[in-house]
Image (cartoon, rainbow, N blue to C red):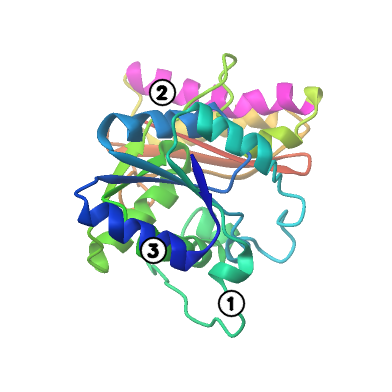
Amino acid sequence: MQTITSVSEMQALSERLRMQGQRIGLVPTMGALHEGHLSLVKIASDIADVIVVSIFVNPTQFGPSEDFTKYPRPLEADLAACEAAGVDYVFAPEPGEIYPKGYSTFVVEEYIAKPLEGASRPSHFRGVTTVVAKLFNIVRPHFSVFGQKDAQQVAVIHKMVADLNFAVEIIIAPTLREADGLAMSSRNRYLTNTQRVEALVISRALRKATEMVAGGERRVDRLIAEATHLIGQHRRVRVIYVSIVDRLTMEAVKGEITPGKSLMAIAAWVDEVRLIDNEIL
């Protein structure tokens, strides 16, 4: 496995690989890798000749009061995990390599990015789309793998790829969960044992909604009310949003859901730790 930190070196390597007829798969990450990330690598390894994992804590997707400075950066452990998983190249640039002095160009998706995370973190998706567009231009992958846990991010990137004619296939991998149901996330490292127990109510609320739909419930207000009620019983957990949206457009669903086409998305604070999760209903 080789670690690359230079944009120009990564671009030159990708050009050589493409000329050799190699199929490149990209797994973009911010590091602090867990089994969820490694499941994306496994999916990529089944269909790629060459796997590239990017590790870059992207400053432009963090708001002024968010956790950019304390976001975990265990690079040595991440590199070891990548090597064990069979990754061929890790692209791990410094911020100044991606955003050099004087950088002033951003990519903005103006529809799917507006609700949910976009409403509570106004600059977040501008940073996401910009860095992903840059990674696509630097790594030049044939396909890229993203996790369903970040459902709105996936929808935004799908739209960006379609609108800007990127020749990159987007593959969506299912959310990986701990044995107790907690969605795997790098931010889970922030949780104390007590907070982790409290955080489980998020996945329980989603599971309750899916059970209600399986039992014939279709009314949006009933599904949201039940999920909100469950979360409200835990004093450490504060709801940011509980929403049911179209899984592709992120538009709020009114009245009744269409099973298989709707998504319940939840964001909540567990004390000072912000977590998101979702399920297709």
Q: Amino acid at mark 3?
A: Gln
Regarding residue 129, the answer to whether it shows in the image is: no
Q: CA distance from mark 3 to mark 1?
A: 17 Å
Residue 78, percent from left and from top: 61, 37
Q: Amino acid at mark 1?
A: Pro
Residues 229 and 132: in front is 132
For this orientation, the residue located farthest to the bottom is 102
Residues 23 and 259: in front is 23
Asked if the residues shown at circle 1 and circle 2 are in contact, with their CB atoms under 8 angstroms apart, the answer is no
Badge 3 is on which residue? 11
Q: Quadrant of the C terminus?
A: top left
Q: Is residue 142 above or below residue 278?
A: below
Badge 2 is on which residue? 210
The disc, 1 or 2, on the residue closer to the chain's N-terminal end is 1
Q: Secondary structure at mark 1?
A: loop
In the rendered structure, does residue 204 fall within the stretch colored magenta?
Answer: yes
Residue 143, percent from left and from top: 29, 47
Left of 128 or right of it: where is 174?
Answer: left
Tell me which corner region of the image, top left, top right, bottom left or bottom right, holds residue 61: bottom right
What residue lies at 52% left-to-right and 26% top-to-bottom?
A: 84
Residues 188 and 210: in front is 188
Badge 1 is on which residue? 100
**Which mark's residue is nearer the viewer, 2 or 3?**
3
Q: Which residues are magenta?
A: 195-215
Residue 261, percent from left and from top: 27, 38
Residue 87, percent from left and from top: 44, 36
Q: CA distance from mark 1 to mark 2?
A: 46 Å
Residue 23: give its label. none
